[in-house]
Image: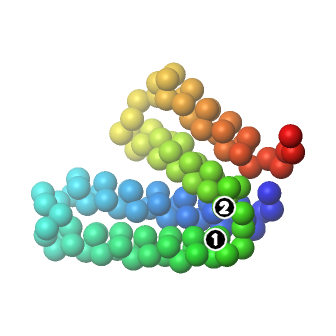
Amino acid sequence: MELRKVLLVFSTVLVTLISALLLNYGAKMSNSLISPLGIGIISVVILVNFLKFVIWGKVYKKYDLSKSYPLVSLFFPLLYAVALYKGDAELKMTKVVGVCFILTGVWFMSRKVNI
């Protein structure tokens, strides 16, 4: 898989991660998302998701969806790593095994193998 495609798809993963972290921050910092802070965060999340929509439009035009879309699954291991870093999650063997399954699946899906 070419590097440009991986970077383009990975940018959508990062944008999704940013969106999730912003919503998490908003939920923790504000008693209600219907407050000035909450509305501001929701507005930023909408803009971030619009950016993701634009990036996916480029991905759909240029690359085979069956090879690029599985890379979106990298969001889950990244989110788990961020949660570990922030102290919001515990390091558990079952979750590490799940992350390994996801990474292995993404690797298999991205390979060019003819049967």
Front-most of 61 and 80? 61
Label 1 Cα crowd, 10 Å radius (few <14 / some 14-19 / many 20+): few
- The number of callouts visible is 2
Label 2 Cα crowd, 10 Å radius (few <14 / some 14-19 / many 20+): few
Mark 1: amino acid: Tyr
Left-right relation of 1 to 27: right
Question: For the point 53% across and 77% down, which residue is it?
Answer: 54
Mark yes or no: residue 78 visible.
no
Left-right relation of 52 to 3: left
Which of the labelled discs sits on residue 60, or is there none?
1
Does residue 55 lie above or below 30 as drawn? below
Question: For the point 36% across and 69% down, which residue is it?
Answer: 45
Front-most of 40 and 52? 52
Task: Tell me the quarter of the image containing the N terminus.
Answer: bottom right
Label 2 residue SS: helix
Mark 1 or mark 2: name the one nearer the start of the chain.
1
Residue extending farthest right: 114
Pointers 1 and 2 in contact (CB under 8 A)?
A: yes
Which of the labelled discs sits on residue 30, or is there none?
none
* Alpha carbons under labels 1 and 2: distance apart: 6 Å
Left-right relation of 81 to 10: left
Task: Tell me the quarter of the image containing the C terminus.
Answer: top right
Horizontal and vertical percent position of residue 96: 54, 29
Horizontal and vertical percent position of residue 94: 49, 23
Question: For the point 28% across and 70% down, which residue is it?
Answer: 42
Left-right relation of 13 to 27: right
Mark yes or no: residue 27 visible.
yes
Mark 2: amino acid: Leu
Horizontal and vertical percent position of residue 35: 13, 69
For disc 2, the marked residue is: 65
Quadrant of the rendered image containing residue 38: bottom left
